[in-house]
Image: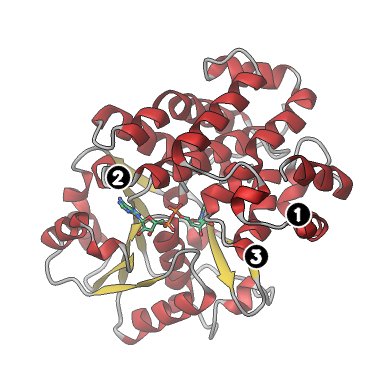
Amino acid sequence: MNLWTFRIPTAVTFGEGAIRDLPRIAATLGQRPLLVADRDLVRLPLWARIQEILPGTPVFAEVTPDPTVGSVDALAAVVRDQRHDVAIAVGGGSAMDCAKAAACLAAGDLPSIRAVHSGGAPLGSARVPLIAVPTTAGTGSEVTPFAVLNDPETQRKGPIAGDALYPVHAVVDPKLTYSLPRKVSVVTGLDALSHAIEGYWSRGHQPLCDLLAVEAARLICRHLRQAAKQPDDARARAAMSYAATLAGAAFQLPKNAMVHACSFPLSTRYHLPHGVACAFTLEEAIRFNAPVMGPRMTDFLRGIGLEDAEELIALVRELKQLGGLPCTLREAGIPPEVIPQLARESFHPLMNNNPRPMTESDLVAMYQRLA
Ligand SMILES: NC(=O)c1ccc[n+]([C@@H]2O[C@H](COP(=O)([O-])OP(=O)(O)OC[C@H]3O[C@@H](n4cnc5c(N)ncnc54)[C@H](O)[C@@H]3O)[C@@H](O)[C@H]2O)c1
Ligand SMILES: [Fe+2]
């Protein structure tokens, strides 16, 4: 067994009704809270519940899906100017990532998060304390040291990383996910499944993360279908929220691999939402990597209650169909002529974590099969 260090510095409060604890948790961290959400979320009934719990708390609701460096800079300016001393991010990965990055930017000296995202500047350790309240069961951002940002100027989407990005506290209340439409439930659930699988097969895998990954994948394989079909099924929703947080904890140290590396150009150039982009190559990735995994893959599959890799591939395909996700480039609206470019741009450093080395011609062949 290789040398490893496990940690997860974020406190996690989990369960139906957990958001009732938000005012108490926030008060332990600061006196001038700011709520952060995306524009769509503040129109949902769940937002009325948040406002009821935190009456009169100022709100920044300008986060866009796949948050841009510009929205991080704008939010950090509000935090600085209004001297907020605790941020509460409510939403999916977009709101959480924007708030996580802005909480660091606001406490440091850099003028723009672009300096970190594409300029190579270190993130630093300063931050305004942040509470993450996920309303999707997907990204696991509530327990990860990453924020995935998009820079429309450079056409670059990718994560920034640093310990300061770990939320201080995650408040995971499955009830907040009941309003997710079927498609978003599937898309975000498959993102979480990708984290569990990639955290497990990453070259940086380690035993404790393996445990979390297997349990997360087992729960997703058992409950995602029902959560998507029956939005208020308390058992399925709780299992999915728990699994997504577990999967976040499972990949935050080993990091992701080819599925996520390939997702970045699919999202930046062709605007596939993150989970759709991950699900797009997931079956191919399982088929490519499983043979080199040997007994570790057998253990994983047994642990999640499946016989073999083909059964996992079939389940992923079934879930994609349930959510109406694209299974081919054609269905995704991506012309086959761009395959060579897609293949070239998929070589994000996460590709180096893949258990089986991936060449450009492997990728071209993969996208041709997906045409
Ligand atoms: N930081 C990390 O570790 C990490 C990991 C994976 C993905 N990500 C990033 O997270 C982002 C994606 O996050 P996401 O998949 O959660 O989607 P999202 O945050 O973009 O939300 C998708 C849509 O769902 C809506 N929504 C959210 N909760 C809802 C609810 N309860 N009911 C109804 N609608 C709801 C939002 O308003 C939005 O319109 C991407 O930018 C991705 O790259 C980050
Ligand atoms: Fe992801």
- On screen, residue 136 above or below 75: above
Q: In the rendered picture of this protein, how many numbered marks are placed on residues? A: 3
Task: Say few, some or many: other residues with alpha carbon within 10 Å of mark 1 (under 14 / 14 to 19 / 20 or more).
Answer: some
Rendered image: mark on residue 269 = 3
Can you say which quadrant of the picture contains the N terminus?
top right
Q: Which of 30 and 365 is in front in this view?
A: 365
Label 2 and label 1: CA atoms lie apart by 36 Å
First along the sequence among labels 2 and 1: 2
Q: Name the residue under label 2.
A: 177
Element class at badge 2: helix
The residue drawn where x is 33% and y is 50% is 135
Q: Mark 1: which amino acid?
A: Pro
Tell me which corner region of the image, top left, top right, bottom left or bottom right, holds residue 56.
Answer: bottom left
Q: Return the x and y of residue 349 as percentages of the image width and height.
A: 74, 55
Evaluate if marks 1 and 3 touch, with contact meaning CB atoms under 8 Å apart: no
> Residue 258 versus residue 287: which sits nearer the camera?
287
Could you tell me if residue 190 is visible in this image?
Answer: yes
Amino acid at circle 2: Thr
